[in-house]
Image (spheres, coloured by chain):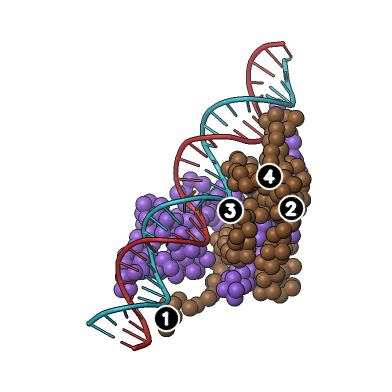
Chain colours: A brown, B purple, C cyan, D red
DNA sequence: ATACAAAATATGTATACACATCTATTACCG
DNA sequence: CGGTAATAGATGTGTATACATATTTTGTAT
């Protein structure tokens, strides 16, 4: 039969460090969403990028990075798989330093097709929390993102 | 003189996706802490690991991973820089499959020495939020970590 | 005692992310 | 207009992270 793992405990003692806590939470949530998105061709990160593009329409790499709080040079490489797999396309802007990113029609279609899987992940998380907890979370994440971005610039 | 960047807007429209939001928030917070920790020899992630070890004392790689919601195999490589730089040490456990991780005395000392920098980061974030917001955040992060871990296993 | 299942970690592979630095382009100032 | 500073993005380098797979060790059923 199966042996019990040595560590059955399931407690996530909060650390005093907000950074440690939020990173840990992000890993936990990412794992859940990735479990659901597995096999769709998109993982959590790229799903986020595509979703942002659905909202934003054609947008420069820099603006996309600013919105996602992602270094724009990081996007240089993060966008590659999406380009390779035909989700997005790019063209130079009027300002020829800029690169404008956009979804392909095919990317838009595929995104719609996998929305149900995303919703399932979202629903699973939601149901593991209270409604109040969920709302608090969304509000808090907006707050802390704003606060951290502000504090960093304020330096 | 300096030209204004084309994108002065500072709004982080929340996305419907909790995963996208928490990952974005984690990036924003990590950047802030890294700014403060810069030059200390530890970045946010490794700081978290060391802090966890301060709390936990000697602990197996697997248990450490469980606590941090980090795949234990990921730790195989994440611990390398800490070993290399003398923050931690390891030895085999009684169960010789296990590897027990512990801080070195030197690591403990260095950690204490850089605590003020960490506190400064924490303080900067805190002051960019309300007290209520801060408390809500800590509670929420505990909630969502627990919920995500639960939901994932429940599958 | 042996055989098989499960656990702990290591390694291969791919993506995620930041910062420093480099290049090309653009903006501004005199 | 010409020179310099600032921006947008690409690339080098190093860490972060997951999962699949391989290896070693341990537990358990017969």
Q: Which of marks 4 and 1 is in front?
A: 4
Question: From what the image shows, is residue D14 above or below residue B101?
Answer: above
Which residue position holds label 3?
B30
Q: Nearer the viewer, mark 3 or mark 2?
A: 2
Q: Where is residue A137 in the image (x, y as percent from the top left)?
A: 70, 66
* Relative depth, front residue between B68 and D17: D17
The answer for how far apart the CA atoms under marks 4 and 2 are is 12 Å
Give the chain letter at badge 3: B
Q: Where is residue B105 in the image (x, y as percent from the top left)?
A: 35, 60
Which residue position holds label 4?
A88
Which residue position holds label 1?
A3
* Relative depth, front residue between A118 and A105: A105
The answer for how far apart the CA atoms under marks 4 and 1 are is 47 Å
Q: Do the dots labelled 1 and 2 sit on one chain?
A: yes
| Residue beneath the point at 70% across and 54% down | A110
What number of labels is visible?
4
Give the chain letter at badge 2: A
Mark sitting on residue A109: 2
The answer for how far apart the CA atoms under marks 3 and 2 are is 34 Å
The local crowd at label 4, few if under 14, some if 14 to 19, many if 20 or more residues have their Cα within 10 Å, is many
Q: Position of residue C1 (x, y in %)?
A: 22, 82
A122 with respect to C19 (left or right): right
Q: Nearer the viewer, mark 4 or mark 2?
A: 2
- Secondary structure beneath dot 1 equals loop
Question: From what the image shows, is residue A154 above or below residue B148?
Answer: above
The local crowd at label 1, few if under 14, some if 14 to 19, many if 20 or more residues have their Cα within 10 Å, is few
The answer for how far apart the CA atoms under marks 1 and 2 are is 46 Å
Q: Earlier in the sequence, mark 4 or mark 2?
A: 4
């Amino acid at each position: 039969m199966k042996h019990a793992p040595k560590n059955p405990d399931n407690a996530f003692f909060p650390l005093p460090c907000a950074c440690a806590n939020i990173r840990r939470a992000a890993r936990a949530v990412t794992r859940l969403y990735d479990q659901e998105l597995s096999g769709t061709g998109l993982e959590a990160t790229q799903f986020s990028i595509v979703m942002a593009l659905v909202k934003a329409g054609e947008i420069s790499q820099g603006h996309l990075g600013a919105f996602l709080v992602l270094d724009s040079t990081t996007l240089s490489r993060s966008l590659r798989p999406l380009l390779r797999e035909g989700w997005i396309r790019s063209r130079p802007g009027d300002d020829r330093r800029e690169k404008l990113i956009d979804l392909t029609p095919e990317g838009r279609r595929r995104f719609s097709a996998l929305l149900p899987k995303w919703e399932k992940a979202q629903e699973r998380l939601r149901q593991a929390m209270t409604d109040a907890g969920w709302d608090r979370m969304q509000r808090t994440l907006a707050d802390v993102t704003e606060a951290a971005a502000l504090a960093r610039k304020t330096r």
